[in-house]
Image (cartoon, coloured by chain):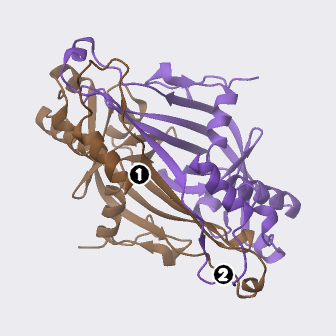
Chain colours: A brown, B purple
Amino acid sequence: MTQFPKEAKNKVVRGAKRATYDKETIYEILDAGFLCHISFVMNGEPFMIPTAYARSGDKIYIHGSVKSRAIKQTKAGAPICFCVTHLDGLVLARSAFHHSVNYRSAIIYGHANELVVDAGKNEALHLITENFLKGRWNEVRQPNQKELDITSVLEISIESASAKIRTGSPVDDEEDYALDIWAGTLPVETRYAAPVDDTKLRPGIATSPSAKLAWEESKE
Amino acid sequence: MTQFPKEAKNKVVRGAKRATYDKETIYEILDAGFLCHISFVMNGEPFMIPTAYARSGDKIYIHGSVKSRAIKQTKAGAPICFCVTHLDGLVLARSAFHHSVNYRSAIIYGHANELVVDAGKNEALHLITENFLKGRWNEVRQPNQKELDITSVLEISIESASAKIRTGSPVDDEEDYALDIWAGTLPVETRYAAPVDDTKLRPGIATSPSAKLAWEESKE
């Protein structure tokens, strides 16, 4: 199956022509980021947190303190809505009404299972760290038993999903193209600046290859 | 009152030392962005959308199609959780466990009222457009009656809120400072690139001052 089934829950109501249910496209959007927003329900009301994640196959991994409210609630089986949004530009039309943004967003619906075996937790933390900064895991001290014990790691099964993508120029009403108004896009670029040494870095330690590479790649 | 009261709903459980309930700080975080995530509950399950917003006083304004599921659900009085997150950098510690991000995030809890008077709707759309790109409103064709009629504008009253901010170097375990591992931060910069003309722009129309200024300011 290369598409997520279009059901009441994930069906895009507005802007349906910008919607996709294609797995590959949705995974590309997820893999292009490391920071998501997760929402869950508690006492009938919505709550949300930003957090780091990684994807592997049809699973998404997140982690947090065993004491976290979001972790406690979602590991108990509460349904989860998970969103990743990349802002690519401002879309500046001739009318206020047709202003928009160029973006890629994916919305995932699912439930979480807590990983309880240390090896599985460690592997998920490996994935999250590598998705955060490629190459970092092998540069640093890996989790010890105490750290694993105070960290909850959740595996979210992607049960349903959709994505929306907008690219390109504004779309104006036909009669507005005659107006003397500039229209176009203002692209948004997200980049890394040069790595900054920890104020407590011991002398003689060079910047890690992971940080150097990410910075250099983001200049291109 | 310069603080939001700390109650069960908005009390930050984890990372409490990075939390604030200070109104001015929370408003600064809101005013530094224009794209939020909003979550709401439908049939007991969480839903979320990314959308544009603007703040004025203790109110937040959002808009959408009258046909939008999120608009329909939230204008009917469903409680809303609203989040704005600014990513400022990767925090690269000596241990995988102490990796983090530098960020500013604000979480708002409230309910929405639909604005039904055209003048009020128009003023909120003015605020949203100006928060999106300062100076743009007066450059473009403003909403006509048909456009106002098919747009819902919601005013969210901020009933409860909190913010979390992390800045600076990683914080490692005391014994890890002796390790031969580079640690530091990788700052994240979000900038505008040069404005791109609409492919259908009529000849002889110069880039709008709003887009030019935003681009120039983001180079600094």
Q: Nearer the viewer, mark 1 or mark 2?
A: 2
* Residue A84 percent location from the top left of the image: 42, 54
Q: Disc 2 marks which amino acid?
A: Leu
Q: Residue at x 33, y 43 (%)?
A: A77
Q: Quadrant of the C terminus of chain A?
A: bottom left
> Residue under circle 2?
B201
Asked where in the image residue B64 lies, by quadrant, the reply is bottom right
Question: Taking B153 as reference, is B97 left or right?
Answer: left
* Residue B175 percent location from the top left of the image: 22, 12
Q: Does any portion of residue A60 appear in the rendered image?
A: yes
| Up/down of A176 relative to B159, above or below | below
> In the drawing, what numbered circle is on residue B51?
none
Q: Nearer the viewer, residue B168 or A175?
A: B168
Q: Residue at x 16, y 40 (%)?
A: A123
> Residue under circle 1?
A82
Q: Residues within 10 Å of mark 1 (few under 14, many from 20)?
A: many
Name the residue at the left extreme.
A119
Asked where in the image residue A107 lies, by quadrant, the reply is bottom left
* Residue B109 percent location from the top left of the image: 62, 39
Q: Residues within 10 Å of mark 2 (few under 14, many from 20)?
A: some
Q: Nearer the viewer, residue B145 or A186?
A: A186
Read off the chain for label 2: B
| Up/down of B9 relative to A30, above or below | above
